[in-house]
Amino acid sequence: MTVLITRPKHDLITRYLCVWSEEILAIARAHYITVYDLEGEKANRKNLESYIKNRPPSFVFLNGHGNAEVVTGHDNEPLVDINSRLPEVIVYARSCDAGQVLGSALIKNGTQAFIGYRRKFICGYTPEKMWKPLEDPIARLFLVPSNLIVSTLLKGHSVQDAHARSKEEMYKNFKKMISSKATYEERYSARWLWSNLNNQVLLGEGGAKI
Amino acid sequence: MNETRENFEELIVDPSLKEQLKKLVLERINVMPNTLRVAVGSEELTKEDMLRHVREEDETGKQLMEAELSFLRDLASGAVYVSA
């Protein structure tokens, strides 16, 4: 079992995604899973295509910006587009809009299963914590459920399980955020988490495992 | 959410309703705490940025409106209290 992860860090949101992905690397190492970690400048198309061709992973975890047809890497270089071939692979794109077109295109091109978002991935954050993303109590509410997709897959569960557990965790956080115990910031952020919850999609074979 | 988007697209066809909804969303953004920011895709937004996007009705503004209106709709219908 091998995992390829792209985690550019050229701006604030990619830095958040990059740092929060370290938890995933730790879980993978604990399970003796080989990880090809394309961090920062390494998150470029040449590296990605080289790994796909020469050491094909069973799971690709893409972090970065994008649109309905593209997910990008370092400095917004397009990494995966509708013509990309990631055969027999499970893909999770923590990126914007990729669930609209790109996911279906990848499935058509041989990808086994795809999880992504039909609209922009929204993440609330606390400006005071922008240099310590792991200590950001608002971002945590968005990124822990997102990481759960990957950790569930790494533990041998199906894509359908990963998708469902992530949505359950989002809903659990959402309920906490709209409760009377929530801070004002948590309550205000709830609408954005609700958007992610309703826009996360699974395409392809739900029973697939890495 | 596709359903929400379709409903939203239908609603904004009516100019007067669209303006009312836009005002509602702007008012709700106005009460956002200053201790909070949001990343919508590649954009890092303050309250003022959000207000501008909604006023200009660009793609980010439209998504902010969608998120707000679907949240309000689902609060009102009770859908937020039904497990995901």
Image (spheres, rainbow, N blue to C red):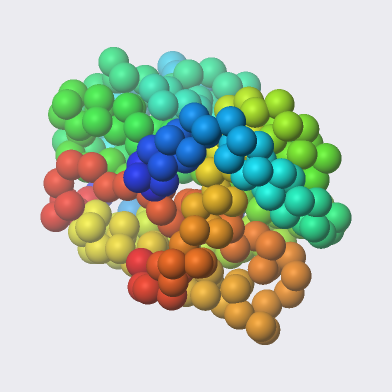
Q: Position of residue A160 (x, y in %)?
A: 23, 58
The residue lying toward the viewer, choosing from A5 and A106, is: A106
Seen at 58% across and 40% down, the residue is B17
Residue A67 in view here: yes
Q: Position of residue B53 (x, y in %)?
A: 71, 32
The residue lying toward the viewer, choosing from A104 and B21, is: B21
Seen at 33% across and 54% down, the residue is A33
The number of numbered discs placed on residues in the rendered structure image is: 0
Q: Is residue A12 left or right of residue A4?
A: right
- Picture quadrant where residue A156 is located: bottom left
Determine whether A176 is above or below A71 in the image. Answer: below
Determine whether A48 is above or below A155 in the image. Answer: above
Seen at 35% across and 32% down, the residue is A100
Q: Is residue A43 left or right of residue B44?
A: left
Residue A129 in view here: no
Q: Position of residue B73 (x, y in %)?
A: 49, 58
Q: Position of residue A15 (x, y in %)?
A: 66, 42
- Picture quadrant where residue A97 is located: top left
Seen at 69% across and 62% down, the residue is A188
The residue lying toward the viewer, choosing from A186 and B11, is: B11
